[in-house]
Each structure stands twice: as structure tokens, then as C-alpha cells.
């Protein structure tokens, strides 16, 4: 893939300088030129330009004044001033007001100018990379704060219930409904176990680099269904694969994706539906596996559809109280990490469908 050229704007009131500059640098950079500060500002409004080079002496406005405006309007740009004068005051103004990174005398030496521009490009790329890293760090910190709060709540709530139920059986051993209490205890323990598993999956998915290997979709989906079907033995499960079930992908993340989607389809079945059904249809090619997973469950209202992949998001449905709010976030994050896509459509009390595209990395 051809990398994008760095965009450079050169401002000078001498037309010959603009022509010479463009001719010398157009092969290596995407060059913009302006014969006035007004034209330059107009270009900056409509183009994401990284490096700004300005002549100091121009009519109506100096290079320092122009770069001072640019610094305020476009602080992420890297600015360079060219002047035919060696006045130290101009240098000081350019640094303090225009926040320039380089100062070059005119007429310039082409080799030195090119070195200066290369230096400015390096500064811009370093700033951009640092900004992205800071944004990623902020996102991670925000998610970590939510994560700590949610984990403390989700782990303590089932434990509190377990302790309460155990104390109740100790106080009233004569009750013949003890089995019911222990069934409730088992349910709470399973809820806790599921929360812990989601935490482990979250950690592994965030930290794992991923490993491409041969994956049999029929095997992993059948195994997941066999492990989960006891949650609701009355559900009709329809599973069809068209094409070779073996693809090359990240098996760990595929397990996260299918386990969470199938588990949700079981959990949010419509109790009034006579024939509760989960359908999975997969079409496999050399390029990808197209998966359509649908159910006829309680569905998701339109107001929640845009938020279901957010970390710790929960709807206001009573059946969602026990949810960790991690599952669908893990699905989206896992599908993103393997370069796939996922779309969801749903109607309340009709059902939900997830449309996934999973790349087949057969050439790797």
C-alpha cells in the first residue's frame, strides 16, 4: 500500500519562489502554495496540511504574524519561517509568537531546506504518534475505571446472596425446602463464575497478540452449543455451514465471539414463544466466513442498539440485571482485532440477528 504523502504549504508573495519550491518538492510531498496569507488561511480551512512554511516579508501581514494566527487556529501543525534578514528580534518573535520549529535564511540552500523540512516532518509524525498514544491511554484508563467499579459490584453481589442463603439454611434446618435454597446458591455461584470468566476473557483479549491457525467452525460452534444448551434444553438449534468449515483465524477470539453471542441468544429467549429457536448459517469462501446468527427472542429496542457493544452497557430490562455488560463488548473488540465486521438488527419481541464477516487468513 502506498503511504500518504506529507502535505506542505509554502506561503510567499514572490511567484517565482512558489514555482521553484513546488518543482523541487512535489515528488516527495503533496505541495500547496499561496501567494498571500489570506489564500493560505483559506487552503488550511479545507485541507489537513501538516507543515507550514512562510516567508517573513509579505504585504499586509508579516510571516511571524501569519504563523501566530496559524499556531492558534491549527496548533498541531509544524511551522517554519524563511527570511532574508538576520534580525535577532524576528527570530525571537518567530519562536515566541509563531512557535516555529525552524528558522531559515533567504535565499535558501536547497539541501539545507530539504533537511529542515525532513526535520519538521519527523516532528509532526512524532507529535501525531504521541497524540494517538495519549488517546489510547486515556481510553484504557477510562475503561479501567469502569472495569474496577463493575467487577467489585458483580463479584460482591453474588457472594452476598450466597452468604445470606447459607445463613438462612443454618437458622432453619427443619425446612424441607432446603434443596430449593441450594439450587438458588448454585445459580448465584454460576453467575459469579460467569463474571470471573468474562474478566479473564477481557484481559486475554486485550493483551493477546493473536495467533492465526487452522480452525474448524463446525467443531467449535458444536462444542460451545453442547456446553451451553443445558441453560435451556427446550431451544431448537439450527446450524448450517455452506462450504469448507475449516478457515484460518484466531481460535481464541472466535470462541469469545460465538460463546457470547450464543449465550445471549439463550438468555434472552421469548418465554411466550412456542418454538424458541436459534439459527446459525455460515457461508465460507477463500476470503471470509459470513455468519448470520439469529433468534426469535425478546429483541432489543432501537434506543439501545447503538450502545450494546459499549463496555458495561446494560439495558433496563429486568432479565438483564444479572448481565455483566462485558459480553457484547468482548464480541465487538474480538471481531475488530481479527479484522472482521459485525452488524446487528433487532425488533422487540420478534428477535435479534447478528451479521458477521470473519476474514479467512488462508494466505498467511
Image (cartoon, rainbow, N blue to C red):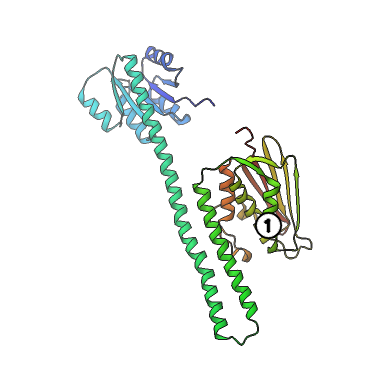
Q: Quadrant of the C terminus?
A: top right
Q: What x and y, as percent, mark residue 76? A: 39, 34
Residue 297 falls in which quadrant of the image? Answer: bottom right
* Foreground pick, 156 / 175: 175
- Visible in this render: residue 243? yes
Q: Image check: 160 left or right of 225?
A: left
- Visible in this render: residue 61? no
* Foreground pick, 9 / 116: 116
Q: What residue appears at the point 61 percent right and 88 percent down from the top-left corner?
A: 174
Q: In the image, is residue 158 above or below residue 215?
A: below
Q: What x and y, as percent, mark residue 206? A: 50, 48
Q: In the image, is residue 6 above or below residue 163?
A: above
Q: Which element is circle 1 on?
A: helix
* Foreground pick, 255 / 50: 255
Residue 36 falls in which quadrant of the image? Answer: top left
Q: In the image, is residue 3 above or below residue 257?
A: above
Q: In the image, is residue 36 above or below residue 70?
A: above
Q: Image check: 214 left or right of 350?
A: left
Q: What x and y, as percent, mark residue 156? A: 49, 68
Q: What residue appears at the point 63 percent right and 74 percent down from the top-left corner?
A: 183
Q: What x and y, as percent, mark residue 232? A: 71, 63
Q: Which residue carries the number 1 mark?
A: 265
Q: Image check: 38 left or right of 255?
A: left
Q: What residue appears at the point 64 percent right and 35 percent down from the top-left corner?
A: 362
Q: What residue appears at the point 59 percent right and 45 percent down from the top-left corner?
A: 335
* Foreground pick, 94 / 177: 177
Amino acid at each position: 500500500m502506498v503511504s500518504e504523502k506529507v502535505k506542505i504549504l509554502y506561503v510567499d508573495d514572490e511567484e517565482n519562489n512558489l514555482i521553484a519550491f513546488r518543482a523541487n518538492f512535489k515528488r516527495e510531498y503533496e505541495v500547496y502554495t499561496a501567494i498571500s496569507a489570506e489564500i493560505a488561511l483559506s487552503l488550511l480551512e479545507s485541507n489537513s496540511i501538516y507543515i507550514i512554511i512562510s516567508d517573513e516579508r509579505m504585504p499586509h501581514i508579516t510571516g511571524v504574524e501569519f504563523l501566530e494566527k496559524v499556531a492558534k487556529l491549527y496548533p498541531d501543525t509544524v511551522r517554519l519561517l524563511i527570511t532574508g534578514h538576520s534580525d535577532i528580534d524576528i527570530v525571537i518573535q518567530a519562536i515566541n509568537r509563531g512557535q516555529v520549529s525552524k528558522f531559515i535564511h533567504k535565499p535558501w540552500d536547497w539541501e539545507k531546506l530539504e533537511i529542515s523540512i525532513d526535520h519538521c516532518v519527523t516532528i509532526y509524525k512524532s507529535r501525531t504518534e504521541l497524540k494517538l498514544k495519549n488517546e489510547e491511554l486515556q481510553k484504557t484508563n477510562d475503561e479501567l475505571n469502569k472495569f474496577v467499579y463493575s467487577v467489585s459490584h458483580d463479584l460482591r453481589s453474588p457472594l452476598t446472596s450466597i452468604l445470606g442463603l447459607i445463613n438462612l439454611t443454618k437458622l432453619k434446618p427443619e425446612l424441607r425446602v432446603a434443596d430449593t435454597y441450594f439450587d438458588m446458591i448454585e445459580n448465584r455461584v454460576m453467575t459469579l463464575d460467569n463474571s470471573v470468566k468474562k474478566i479473564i476473557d477481557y484481559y486475554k483479549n486485550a493483551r493477546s497478540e493473536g495467533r492465526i491457525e487452522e480452525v474448524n467452525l463446525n467443531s467449535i460452534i458444536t462444542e460451545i452449543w453442547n456446553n451451553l444448551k443445558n441453560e435451556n434444553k427446550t431451544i431448537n438449534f439450527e446450524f448450517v455451514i455452506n462450504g469448507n468449515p475449516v478457515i484460518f483465524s484466531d481460535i481464541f477470539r472466535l470462541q469469545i465471539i460465538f460463546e457470547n453471542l450464543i449465550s445471549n441468544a439463550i438468555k434472552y429467549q421469548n418465554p411466550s414463544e412456542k418454538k424458541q429457536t436459534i439459527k446459525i448459517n455460515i457461508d465460507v469462501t477463500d476470503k471470509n466466513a459470513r455468519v448470520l446468527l439469529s433468534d426469535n427472542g425478546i429483541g432489543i429496542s432501537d434506543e439501545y442498539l447503538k450502545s450494546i457493544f459499549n463496555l458495561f452497557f446494560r439495558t433496563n430490562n429486568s432479565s438483564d440485571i444479572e448481565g455483566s455488560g462485558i459480553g457484547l463488548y468482548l464480541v465487538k473488540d474480538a471481531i475488530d482485532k481479527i479484522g472482521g465486521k459485525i452488524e446487528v438488527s433487532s425488533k422487540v419481541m420478534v428477535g435479534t440477528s447478528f451479521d458477521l464477516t470473519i476474514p479467512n487468513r488462508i494466505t498467511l
